[in-house]
Image: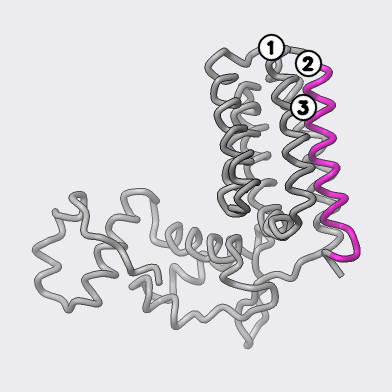
Amino acid sequence: MICNIVWRRDARPFAGELRRIGKLEQTAFVHLQVMRMKYSTISDIVLERIREDILSGRLKPGEKINQNRLTKELGVSIIPLREAFKRLQAEGYINIIPHRGAYVGELSHDEIEDIYLVRAELEELAAALAAENLTEDDIKTLRALFRSMKKATKEHRRQELLALNRKFHFTIYRACRRKHLLEILEDLWDRSSRYRNLQTFLPRRAEEELKEHKQILEACQNGVRKSLMTTIRVNVEQSRRSLTSPKQIR
């Protein structure tokens, strides 16, 4: 439950208001105030919560989103919830059916193909632009991340591996120094996160990816632009193939 949050120093300015409400309401209130420090609007808070639930698998494909539960847990009105729904529908995370409610979008073979085909092109471009800009600090970060990925793969820590994988790739892509390209890639990675979760249950693919990331790391260390472009594209295309196999999306 999202309301489970420890009392933090940055919530103290609201102590006077907290004394006037009940314990459960206090927890929700503190969470909302702390979240407001991170996001600009209440609808941003709601959007991030629902997106996180979808990406983590807490909300399953086709599942109806319980609006009443969310408004109570987050301590918000229905208005920011509806605003968040509109944005999530535009991003492809949910489907809003008139007079029935909001449902988590189904997993789609065509969507995987679309996302990963575009990702292959743009990530290869980002790698090409980044190759000459990678610093020694970037290489050190990549080595450390690869060691952590190796350990997480061996210990089957799937969710941690997903986070490490993203950090590894964007350590490279940020070196391309192209703001709009990075924003597009971030969005594509967000959209593909639901599908990436499927791969965490494929041990063989995890081992294959580790080998691919070793090759990417070696290309970064050697400073070979063409090699980095190739290894990045291979990694993205292999992920697409594993996800579009009949055993994954039906």
Q: Amino acid at mark 3?
A: Gln
Q: Nearer the viewer, residue 248 or 207?
A: 207
Q: Where, by quadrant of the figure, is residue 250 drawn?
A: bottom right
Q: Amino acid at mark 1?
A: Glu
Under tag 1, what secondary structure? loop
Query: Which residues make up the magenta segment?
Result: 226-247
Disc 1 to disc 3, how far (Cα)? 17 Å
Would you name the residue on which mark 3 appears? Answer: 215
Under tag 2, what secondary structure? helix
Of labels 1 and 3, earlier in sequence is 1
Would you name the residue on which mark 1 appears? Answer: 132
Residue name at image x 85 percent, y 62 percent:
109
Would you name the residue on which mark 2 appears? Answer: 225
Say left or right for 85 vs 218. Answer: left
Query: Vertical placement of 188 versus 84: above or below?
Result: above
Disc 3 to disc 2, how far (Cα)? 13 Å
Under tag 3, what secondary structure? helix
Label 2 with label 1: CB-CB less than 8 Å: yes
